[in-house]
Amino acid sequence: MARTYAIVNQKGGVGKTTTAVNLAAIAAEQGLRVLLVDADPQANATSGMGIDRSNLEACIYDILVADPDSLSSDTVEGIICHGPLDLLWVLPATIDLAGADMSLATSIAREQRLRRALSCLANQYQIVIIDTAPSLGLLTVNSLTAADTVLIPIQCEYYALEGLSQLLHVVRLVQADLNPSLRIEGVVLTMYDGRTNLSRQVAEQVRTHFPGRVLDTVIPRNVRLAEAPSHGLPAVLYDSHCSGSMAYRALAKEVFTGEKEGSGKRS
Ligand code: ADP
Ligand code: MG
């Protein structure tokens, strides 16, 4: 089975999609077969991979609301699109996904729809990365239920820690009831600006709050990361050598192999 990562934080604008899209592209560049799952109705991961949502006849919504017993590898594969690298595929979203919480409200096994759909794919992908919506609703619960590992991007700004206790509470509920093997890989500090006291203070505060859980790699604020989506490319393909791309490569190394850049120590 593929190793599955959910990139989660119910706050919007913290760098979830940027993290998901770039980690997916880096893994594919490194020769792994990667599926990026877009579980956010805003569909930024889909468009960020250069996929035109208006041309899609079906999206992740259709497999979430389908009768789980009717799903096959062919039905799920039929919705998957090829991304901008040979080994990179995307299970896309469209705005239709905004109706998922309502449509699934009274459905059987409603929290396990994504897990069941991905399990149809057997060994076709080695890494699955799920970009999640800015909420703790059913879509995010589906993402956590389908995942092995959670990665939490935190923006180095005021109120960074706000809402994290609810997020951890939901992770614990999912661990208790739906997915006991779910693990928190850690917190990724994003949009760090070393010139400001604020970024340094927030980083310190987050490290104090999550001792040993904050990944060593810090993602800097870098305009190339913000420009890349308008070109329909992950930043690591748009500008391979910018500071943001370099940081995401270091993060990929840390997340996928457990290795650190530089010192080799675990914090
Ligand atoms: P989320 O998915 O959590 O809502 P995004 O990844 O979409 O967050 O990021 C929010 C906005 O900030 C986007 O416009 C994105 O391009 C930009 N952005 C993300 N990370 C960085 C960064 N490290 N430096 C500069 N801009 C960033
Ligand atoms: Mg997003």
Image (cartoon, helix red, strand yellow):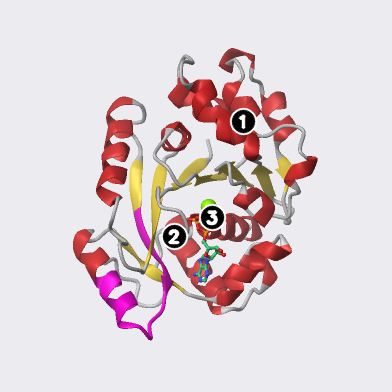
Q: Quadrant of residue 31?
A: bottom right
Q: Is residue 168 magenta?
A: no
- On screen, 48 above or below 261? above
For label 1, the residue is 61
Where does label 3 land, which residue? Answer: 17
**Residue 195 shown in magenta:** yes
Q: Give the crowd class for mark 3: few <14, some 14-19, many >=20 residues within 10 Å.
A: many
Disc 2 target residue: 14
Q: Ligand 1 near label 2 (Cβ, under 8 Å)?
A: yes
Is the CB atom of the residue marked by disc 3 within 8 angstroms of ligand 2's nearest atom? yes
Q: Mark 1: few, some, or many residues within 10 Å (few <14, many ≥20)?
A: many
Query: Which residues, given as a range, are shown in magenta?
Result: 186-204
CA distance separating discs 3 and 2:
9 Å
Q: Is residue 65 above or below residue 37?
A: above
The amino acid type of the residue labelled 1 equals Tyr
Q: Are marks 2 and 1 in contact (CB under 8 Å)?
A: no
